[in-house]
Amino acid sequence: MPASSSSLAAVPAPAVPEAGSAPSTRTARRGRLHALDGLRLVAALMVCLYHYAGRGGTVSASWHQSPSRVFPTLSQVATYGCLGVQFFFVISGFVICMSSWGRSLGDFFRSRVARLYPAYWVALVLVTGAALVLPAVVHAVRPDEFLVNLTMLQQPMGAPRVLGVCWTLWVEVRFYALFALFVVLPGVTYRRVVLFAGVWTLTAVVCRTSGNELTDQLVMPEYAPFFVGGLALYLIHRFGGDLLLWGIVAVSWLLGQETATQALWHPGAHGDFVRSPLVILLVVTLAFAAVAAVALGWTGRANWPWLATAGALTYPFYLVHEHLGWFVIRVLHRGLGLPAYPTLAAAVLGMLGLAWLMHRFVEKPFGPRLKKALKKSRTPAVPASFTLPKR
């Protein structure tokens, strides 16, 4: 989810592709892709609606009853909001390919660290503080567990997550690592991105039959199709579409709808939040179609400046909305007796307001400083006159 909003700024001019490797050398469309900013916020709001009205568990405790009874109609829609995560991954594939073009591995690493960590650290502090105030909503963690969460590597370490949504960050980090190793390190070109997309797709399919936990963790077969689809859609945006690129998108969509359906549809299930495989297919299709519309330039008129702000708020909003939103719901609805829909609106708007504060006072000042500090911390070159002492 956390694809950089700054990386959506200006689409870099295309490098000359390798001989015979690109269908076209068409100049990439310039200007900020405001529609992509808007899509990121839509995906975040989908996940938010799912956490507030489309599931049971802790959110039921916040409302004091199942959201299916609080929102009989809305909850039937909200239960599909979890597919906003897959939507994020398609967008992320597009954005990471765009933002890494012409960058070195060091530049790529610094941009990802500076983008992800400042807001993430602040969100950890805020949610941990909420756990101390109202443990019924957010379970407190031990100091050692909080500290390992600072690394964003708590899942492979087997430590509890402070932020419920950070499992998606671990997926993103693994995608960044794969893309950096096989594409950014040798240099981003049309041919390398296409080769990476093809090999990753084939490997992901094979991994589903291996039953090996390590390869599943590395290859992520359940999420690979969404990232690969986004990569191909960016190539279409940059170079123009052809049968090869649209074929990659089509295969990614076919595989993605299957992995999403397998994960979210349970035949014979009963209860408050039962999903239809047809609706899952529809939502996945709309996610691919929305990013494809951006890739084809159909959204060029959606250049409203407020979309840039919406895109900037998406990442901090995504980080804090779940647990702190439950906190707000519990206080306003159960504590103060505010009706359900005004409480829902207040929770969403409150989290957007908090996201703006985090963007304004954390991301904007500290992100560039962190990137600059990382650049200064490079290992100094050894002077040409330096010689080892003789023994």
Image (tube, rainbow, N blue to C red):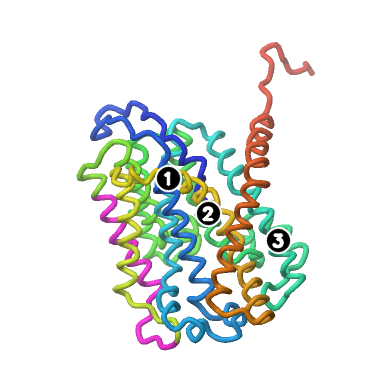
Lower sequence index among marks 3 and 2 = 3
Is 265 covered by the magenta stretch? Answer: yes
* Residue denoted by label 2: 314
- Is residue 317 positioned above or below 325 on the image? above
- The one nearer the camera, 302 or 158, is 302
* Residue stretch in magenta: 247-271
What is the three-letter code of the residue carrying label 3?
Leu
Q: Quadrant of residue 252?
A: bottom left
Q: Measure the C-alpha gap from mark 1 to mark 2.
A: 16 Å
* Residue denoted by label 3: 126
Is 39 covered by the magenta stretch? Answer: no
- Is residue 319 positioned above or below 10 on the image? below
Lower sequence index among marks 1 and 2 = 1
* Residue denoted by label 1: 304
Where's residue 277, x and y in %?
A: 32, 75
- Is residue 273 positioned above or below 283 on the image? below
Q: Residue at x 40, y 86 (%)?
A: 269
- The one nearer the camera, 313 or 181, is 313
Circle 2 residues within 10 Å: few <14, some 14–19, many ≥20? many
Q: Determine the main secondary structure of the stretch shown in magenta.
A: helix
What is the three-letter code of the residue carrying label 1?
Trp
| Pair 1/3: label in front | 1
Q: Are marks 3 and 2 in contact (CB under 8 Å)?
A: no
Q: Residue at x 61, y 57 (%)?
A: 353
Where's residue 350, x and y in %?
A: 61, 63
- The one nearer the camera, 123 or 53, is 53
